[in-house]
Amino acid sequence: MHGGEQAADIAGRELDVALPPHLRALATRLTAAFEMLQVSGFRHELTVLAPAGRIVELLTFCRDEPDLRCELLADLSGVHWPGGKRTESAQETTGWPSYEFADEAGRIEVDYVLYSLTHGHRFRVRVELPDDDPVMPTATGVYGAANFMEREVYDFFGVRFDGHPNLVRILMPDDWDGFPLRKDYPLGGVDVQYKGATIPPPDQRHY
Amino acid sequence: MSQTRTPATSGAGWQEADEPADGRRLTPAVPSEHTVVGGDWQELPNAVEDDLMVINMGPQHPSTHGVLRMLLTLDGETVLDNQAVIGYLHTGIEKNTEYRPWVQGVTFVTRMDYLSPLFNELGYCMAVEKLLDIADQVPERAQAIRVIVTELVRVASHLVWLATAGLELGSTTAMIFGFREREGILDVLEHVTGLRMNHAYIRPGGLAMDLPDDFSERVGTLLTAMKTRIDEFEVLLTTNPIWVERNSGVGVLSAEQCLDLGVTGPILRSAGIAHDLRKAHPYCGIEQYEFAIPTADTADAYGRFQVRVAEMRESLKIVRQAVDGLPTGPVMVADRKIAWPAQLGLGPDGIGNTEEYVGKIMGQSMEALIHHFKLVTEGFTVPEGQVYIPVESPRGELGYHVTSSGTNKPYRVKVRDPSFIHIGVLQAVTHGLSVSDVIAAVASLDPVMGGVDR
């Protein structure tokens, strides 16, 4: 599922069973201000899907509006959904899931978790980006905490945050190739970039 | 061989004696000129136009709490800029969890923040339970024991903080005391879980095994002892002039800065904001116990010391109440498709499957064996979805952002580790301090590099 299809699916879900009343009210409040938002709920958690271009505006709104007051950017994470048909060998204990890749572009979800100490509500703002060229504006101007968090997402997924003051790798070595938490990046079987050695993939290790 | 040397005209050049033709050196190289004024020291700062010096602190500096490296830009002794360089302990735990069944994830995440392993397990397991929608089926006894062990870990973690912070400021007594008391707590945890650290005790759906029979006596002894031991700390440090001087006004982070930079936990509470997830969004039935949220209004390293010491007392109170009101019953969900099939017990060679359980699956019931084998090797599948579970770890909000694609392995486990966020505030906390105060300021943040780098 990609793009519009995914969005339509999210919008089609029943919100009433999934969300408690205060989050439903919050969803109404947000969609009233930004009519392009798509809202979904799962296990009493609200997710708001926003276009990448409006993310700074939306975050500023969530931070500054008195009835939202999200003082804290609690978390910023990414999830990679590769393109094409994805098949996972679900029932094996170890080894990695085998993926099938096709030409169709995949997507990277960037999830902001906002939290309000004043009102005690927490919700997720999601942005979906194409995985071949993920670019979006930085949120460092809205939340200072976004600085390290965005560097981490860049380091692991290659999402470029436009306007970030220092967008360099943070946990991986500076000269590392590739973005390790993408699904097309293997767990083993890669050159150990420090010493030129190779770790075999788990299903080929003998010990 | 000639012994003559050319007289040095300037600087501290090293003059070689004439060497024989075959290249063998007969005399050691000696400095050609000896002065008492110390050469060109004065030229060193003059050589740099802006008089700034960039100093590497770490990653092997003894006061950086592990492998943290700080690039300090100094004007004399004053810190103008502090860039944290991290990643030396990055082990790819988040990636690894994607290749193992859900239950095995516990064994990975417990190794992240190694001073509060049970909080990692708790956050992860609560996230899995929420995805499975069985959070309300976890037995009360399991929930109460989760509270007991995590609050004990909170005390142990604060003790390590006190010990290391004390050591870094020169109080070796605090270090000895802190590690000694922590050992008492780890003994009890070892008695319960079989391991001092990295317990893998909390499992999706409940606990690995029930408490040992003599648990309440042992923990009772511990609680009584801990109370007086914390008093000892207070006697040792609270009004100790050196401790107060070194910590007061150091590492100030106002409430506004804390919120902007995502800082939670004792650092936020030391800035006067009484925010604690145990009160704001109670989990594991912690709302039934009475405890306070200690705060301070100094927003500095000393305030954080006060908050942490008070928190230890509150945690002991919670443990006391939870042990006294411990409900009976199972410690794992009733759903046999999720509950770990083993029955653990203490044998002559340590903790393992009990004899009657092994006898049952090996000798009596083929179905039980198949069930055991399937669940242990394949695990259970978890419905598609994404959840975010925050728990109040000793350092602040520990969040588990877990995505499932509907298989027996996690699709993505993102950990919001408070230490990682708190390393991001180093620049704000240390700006304008002297180098010696940087140590006190970093210590007051209590970063655990295992959690920072994951």
Image (cartoon, coloured by chain):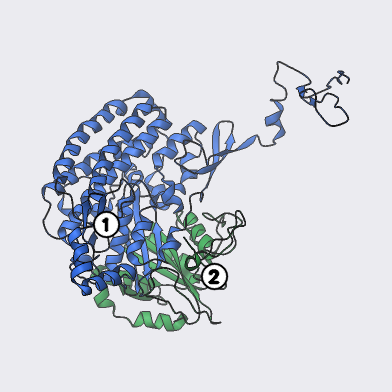
Q: Is residue A3 above or below residue B426?
A: below
Give the letter of the blue chain: B
Residue A60 visible? The answer is no
The chain under label 1 reads: B
Cα gap from disc 2 to disc 1, whole angstroms: 38 Å
Residue A102 sits above or below residue B42 on the image: below
Residue A133: name its quadrant.
bottom right
Of residues B32 and B440, the one nearer the viewer is B32
Q: Chain of mark 2?
A: A
* Image position of B208 (left or right of B14): left
Name the residue rendered at 19%, 53% in the picture: B145
The residue lying at 30 percent from left, 65 percent from top is: B128
| In the displayed structure image, the side of residue B422 where residue A120 appears, left or right | left
Q: Are marks 2 and 1 in contact (CB under 8 Å)?
A: no
Q: Which hue is chain A drawn in?
A: green
Determine which quarter of the picture holds residue A167: bottom right
Q: Which of A124 and B370 lies nearest the eye of the viewer?
A: B370
**Three-letter residue code for mark 1:** Ile
Query: Which residue bears the numbered disc 1?
Result: B202
Q: Which residue is mark 2?
A: A134
Which kind of residue does numbered mark 2 sit on? Answer: Pro
Front position in the image: A196 or A102: A196
Q: Secondary structure at mark 2?
A: loop
Please, what secondary structure does the residue beneath circle 1 have?
A: strand
